[in-house]
Image (spheres, grey):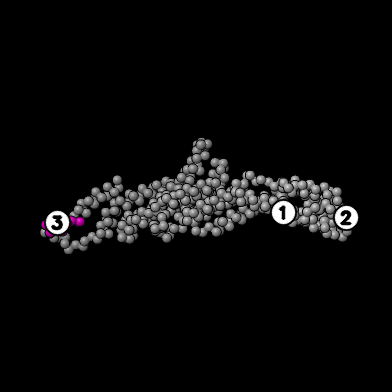
C-alpha cells in the first residue's frame, strides 16, 4: 500500500522526466522554457520517488519494534496460572522476533545500498538504517532482560535456568543460520555488529545461567550451548569454556569427596582412615596398633573385608549424570582417592608409627590395589 501510494503520486513526475528522444523532439518547443533548468540525476529521482515510502515504512517498523520490546505491565492478580507458564515462551518469542527483524533489516540495508549506488543519503536507506539501529538496541536490551529473568522464569516453568538459556540460544542460532541478513556476503554496519554477534548473545546467556549451574547436568547443558554457537560461527568461546570447565571441576570435586567417604565406609577403610586422622600429632612412642579402631584385630578384619571388595568395587553408577565422560571421570577420581587412603595406611603401618608385630594382614601393595580397584 505504501509503495502504490508513493509511486502513484510520483507517476506524473517520472512520466514527464523520463521520455524518449522522439518525444523530446516533438515537445521541444513546449518545454523549451525549462531547458535551462538543472536536470535530476538518477539518484535524485530514486530518492524523490522513495521518500514517500520511507516515512510511513519507518513509522510502521518502529511501531512493531517498540511493541515487541515493551514489557507488558500486567497485574499479577489478573494473571492465570496458564499465562504465567506461558511467560517464558512469550519472552523468547519477543526476543527472537526482534533478532529476526534485525536480520531482515541488515539484508534490506545492504540490498538498498547496492540499488542506490551506495548513496547513503537515499531516504529509504536512511529509514532502514534508523530502524536497524532502533531494532538492535531493542534486541540487546530485551536479551539482557531475559537473561536477568532466568531465575524467575525457572520458578514459573519448573525448568532449569541452563535449559531456558539453551532454548533461547537455540532459537537465535536458528534465525542466524536461516536469515539472509546474517549471511557471510551481507555487510552489517560496523557499529551494530557487536550487539548482533553470536559472541554477545552466547556470552550474555551463558554467564547469566552460570550462577545457577549447580549440577553436572547443568554444566553439560552450558557446554552444549557453546558447542551449538561454535557450529553457527561463534569466534570467542575460550573464556566461556574455561568458566564452565572451572564450575564443572568444582562440582565434580565436591561430588567425588562425598561419594569417596561413602565408598570408604562400604569397603571398611573408612573407620581405619578416621582413626588414623584422629592421631593429629605424633608423640614419641605412640603407635597405630595402640589406637582404638587400629588394633591388630581391627585392622586384620578391616583389611580382609576391603580385599574382598576389590573384585567388585562398590563404586557409584552415577546414573543421574547424563554425560558418560563425566561419569567415568567421577568414578576414576573416587578410585584414585580410595587407593590413596589405602596407600597412606599401608605406608604408616609399615613405618615405626605402626607398632604391629605381624603385618601379614597387608596382603596387597598399593600398586596391586590400584590395579584391582580400578578394573
- Contact flag, marks 2 and 1 (Cβ < 8 Å): no
Query: Which residue is disc 1 drawn over?
Result: 371
Q: Nearer the viewer, residue 184 or 22?
A: 184
> Residue 288: percent from the left, percent from the top?
84, 54
- Asked if one can make out residue 341 in the rendered structure from this viewpoint, the answer is no
User: What residue lies at 21% left-to-right and 62% top-to-bottom?
Assistant: 38
Q: Which residues are magenta?
A: 17-27
User: What residue lies at 32% left-to-right and 52% top-to-bottom?
Assistant: 54
- Contact flag, marks 1 and 3 (Cβ < 8 Å): no
Q: Nearer the viewer, residue 23 or 279?
A: 279
> Residue 212: percent from the left, percent from the top?
59, 49
Q: Nearer the viewer, residue 71 or 28?
A: 28
Query: Which residue is disc 3 drawn over?
Result: 23
Disc 1 from disc 3: Cα separation:
100 Å
> Residue 210: percent from the left, percent from the top?
58, 52
User: What residue lies at 84% left-to-right and 54% top-to-bottom?
Assistant: 359
Q: Earlier in the sequence, mark 2 or mark 3?
A: 3
Within-10-Å neighbours for mark 2: few <14, some 14–19, many 20+: few
Disc 1, SS: helix
**238 within the magenta span:** no
Query: Which residue is disc 2 drawn over?
Result: 357
Q: Is residue 24 left or right of residue 161?
A: left
User: What residue lies at 16% left-to-right and 60% top-to-bottom?
Assistant: 34
Amino acid at each position: 500500500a505504501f509503495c502504490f501510494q508513493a509511486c502513484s503520486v510520483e507517476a506524473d513526475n517520472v512520466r514527464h522526466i523520463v521520455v524518449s528522444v522522439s518525444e523530446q523532439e516533438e515537445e521541444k518547443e513546449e518545454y523549451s522554457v525549462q531547458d535551462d533548468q538543472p536536470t535530476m540525476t538518477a539518484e535524485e529521482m530514486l530518492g524523490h520517488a522513495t521518500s514517500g515510502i520511507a516515512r510511513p515504512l519507518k513509522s510502521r517498523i518502529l511501531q512493531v519494534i517498540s511493541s515487541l520490546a515493551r514489557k507488558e505491565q500486567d497485574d499479577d492478580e489478573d494473571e492465570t496460572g496458564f499465562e504465567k507458564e506461558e511467560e517464558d515462551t512469550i519472552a523468547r518469542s519477543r526476543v527472537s522476533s526482534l533478532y529476526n527483524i534485525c536480520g531482515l533489516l541488515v539484508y534490506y540495508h545492504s540490498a538498498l545500498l547496492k540499488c542506490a549506488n551506495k548513496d547513503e543519503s537515499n531516504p529509504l536507506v536512511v529509514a532502514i538504517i534508523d530502524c536497524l539501529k532502533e531494532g538492535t538496541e531493542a534486541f540487546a536490551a530485551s536479551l539482557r532482560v531475559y537473561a536477568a529473568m532466568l531465575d524467575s522464569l525457572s520458578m514459573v516453568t519448573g525448568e532449569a535456568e541452563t535449559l531456558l538459556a539453551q532454548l533461547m540460544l537455540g532459537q537465535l542460532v536458528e534465525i542466524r543460520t536461516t536469515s539472509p541478513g546474517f549471511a557471510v556476503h551481507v555487510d552489517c554496519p560496523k557499529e551494530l555488529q557487536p550487539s548482533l554477534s553470536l559472541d554477545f548473545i552466547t556470552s550474555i546467556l551463558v554467564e547469566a545461567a552460570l550462577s545457577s549451574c549447580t549440577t553436572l547436568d547443568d554444566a553439560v547443558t552450558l557446554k552444549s550451548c557453546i558447542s551449538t554457537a561454535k557450529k553457527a560461527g561463534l569466534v570467542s568461546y575460550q573464556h566461556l569454556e574455561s568458566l564452565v570447565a572451572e564450575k564443572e571441576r568444582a562440582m565434580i570435586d565436591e561430588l567425588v569427596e562425598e561419594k569417596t567417604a561413602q565408598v570408604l565406609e562400604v569397603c571398611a577403610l573408612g573407620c581405619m582412615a578416621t582413626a588414623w586422622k584422629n592421631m593429629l600429632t605424633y608423640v614419641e612412642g605412640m603407635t597405630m596398633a595402640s589406637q582404638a579402631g587400629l588394633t591388630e584385630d581391627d585392622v586384620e578384619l578391616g583389611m580382609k573385608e576391603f580385599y574382598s571388595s576389590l573384585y567388585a568395587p562398590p563404586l557409584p553408577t552415577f546414573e543421574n549424570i547424563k554425560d558418560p565422560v563425566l561419569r567415568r571421570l567421577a568414578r576414576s577420581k573416587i578410585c584414585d582417592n580410595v587407593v590413596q587412603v589405602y596407600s597412606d595406611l599401608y605406608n604408616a603401618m609399615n613405618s615405626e608409627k605402626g607398632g604391629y608385630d605381624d603385618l601379614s594382614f597387608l596382603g596387597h601393595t598399593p600398586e596391586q590395589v590400584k590395579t584391582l580397584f580400578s578394573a
